[in-house]
Image (cartoon, grey):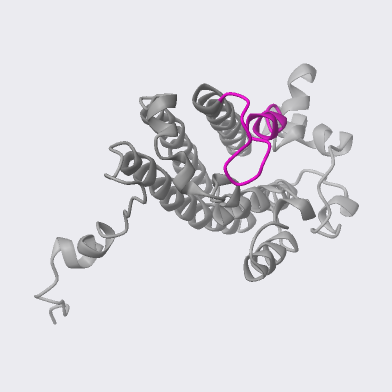
């Protein structure tokens, strides 16, 4: 029996290309040439954030079910997406400060600081901070709260590690997940043992480190791009701009994986 299919389906209708191409609506007069680039870059970021959320959720399921090979594939994809996010900064940096300031006032109070999806990515990675969502709409705050009471990516990894026979303290595995994880020496002991005796699990750990490094790289490129474009000016959404972004640098997500480096 042949599979049913929609004979009227086309590339354009499947991807809703016509609708997609109507979503870029510059506000500047003219409009300013570079505003289109600004809009498309940030819309693309939001699409990648959506995909990252999709991949992180599946990677958590893969790790918690002990499926190393699938987890490795998903975590590798996440790292590759992060590389694309970094590369997009190169495109934004083709826009000079004068070109950006030609339409910046039209942005009013809008800002990347208001990206709900990026806050969700941070929550999935383990950020537990009431301040990170306080400026977002109430319904988004509730969505982030739901993420914060569940397992972070690190929690899912620790479940995976425990299932491989390595001793993770019960107080770590069973703690309230809406409390931020703190570095733990006993967890680090288990991770050292894992690296020395379980090559497959060690690959999963190193893939997480790749992602952590990728996030830090993206943050760095982002802050330098903003500094290059607006200097020390306040951010368009009322944030402190470069000062706020710089405060997020060099804050690793998976601290235990970094701290064991000096113990090998």
Q: Disc count in the image?
A: 0
Q: Does the magenta portion include 247?
A: yes
Farthest-out residue, left: 7
Q: Does residue 220 appear left or right of residue 179 in this picture?
A: left
Q: Nearer the viewer, residue 250 or 195?
A: 250
Q: Position of residue 131 (x, y in %)?
A: 77, 52
Q: Does residue 31 appear left or right of residue 165 in this picture?
A: left
- Does residue 19 lie above or below 79 as drawn? below
Residue at 38%, 47% in the rendered image? 44
Residue at 25%, 64% in the rendered image? 19
Q: Quadrant of the N terminus?
A: bottom left
Q: Position of residue 39 (x, y in %)?
A: 37, 46
Q: Position of residue 111 (x, y in %)?
A: 55, 47
Q: Does residue 46 appear left or right of residue 250 in this picture?
A: left
Farthest-out residue, right: 171
Q: Nearer the viewer, residue 117 or 55?
A: 117
Q: Position of residue 259 (x, y in %)?
A: 78, 26
Give the image quarter of residue 246. top right
Q: Which residues are magenta?
A: 231-250
- Does residue 252 lie above or below 51 as drawn? above
Farthest-out residue, front: 29
Q: Nearer the viewer, residue 3 or 165?
A: 3
Q: Does the magenta portion include 65?
A: no
Residue at 44%, 42% in the rendered image? 77
Residue at 39%, 35% in the rendered image? 102
Q: Nearer the viewer, residue 178 or 202?
A: 178
Magenta: main secondary structure: loop
Q: Quadrant of the C terminus?
A: top right
């Amino acid at each position: 029996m042949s599979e049913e299919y929609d004979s009227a389906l086309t590339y354009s209708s499947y991807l809703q290309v016509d609708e997609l191409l109507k979503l870029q609506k510059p506000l500047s007069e003219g409009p300013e040439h570079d505003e289109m680039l600004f809009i498309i870059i940030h819309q693309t970021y939001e699409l990648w954030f959506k995909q990252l959320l999709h991949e992180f959720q599946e990677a958590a399921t893969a790790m918690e079910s002990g499926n190393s090979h699938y987890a490795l594939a998903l975590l590798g994809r996440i790292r590759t997406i992060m590389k694309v996010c970094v590369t997009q900064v190169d495109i934004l940096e083709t826009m000079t400060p004068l070109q950006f300031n030609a339409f910046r006032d039209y942005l009013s109070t809008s800002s990347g600081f208001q990206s709900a999806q990026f806050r969700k990515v941070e929550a999935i990675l383990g950020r537990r901070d009431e301040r990170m969502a306080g400026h977002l709409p109430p319904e988004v705050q509730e969505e982030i709260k739901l993420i914060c009471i569940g397992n972070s990516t690190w929690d899912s990894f620790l479940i995976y590690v425990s299932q491989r026979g390595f001793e993770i303290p019960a107080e770590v595995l069973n703690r309230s997940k809406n409390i931020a994880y703190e570095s733990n020496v006993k967890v680090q002991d288990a991770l050292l043992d894992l690296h020395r005796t379980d090559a497959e699990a060690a690959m999963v750990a190193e893939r997480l480190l790749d992602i952590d490094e990728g996030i830090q790289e993206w943050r760095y490129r982002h802050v330098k791009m903003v500094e290059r474009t607006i200097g020390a000016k306040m951010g368009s959404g009322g944030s402190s701009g470069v000062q706020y972004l710089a405060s997020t640098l060099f804050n690793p997500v998976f601290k235990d994986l970094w701290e064991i480096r000096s113990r090998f």
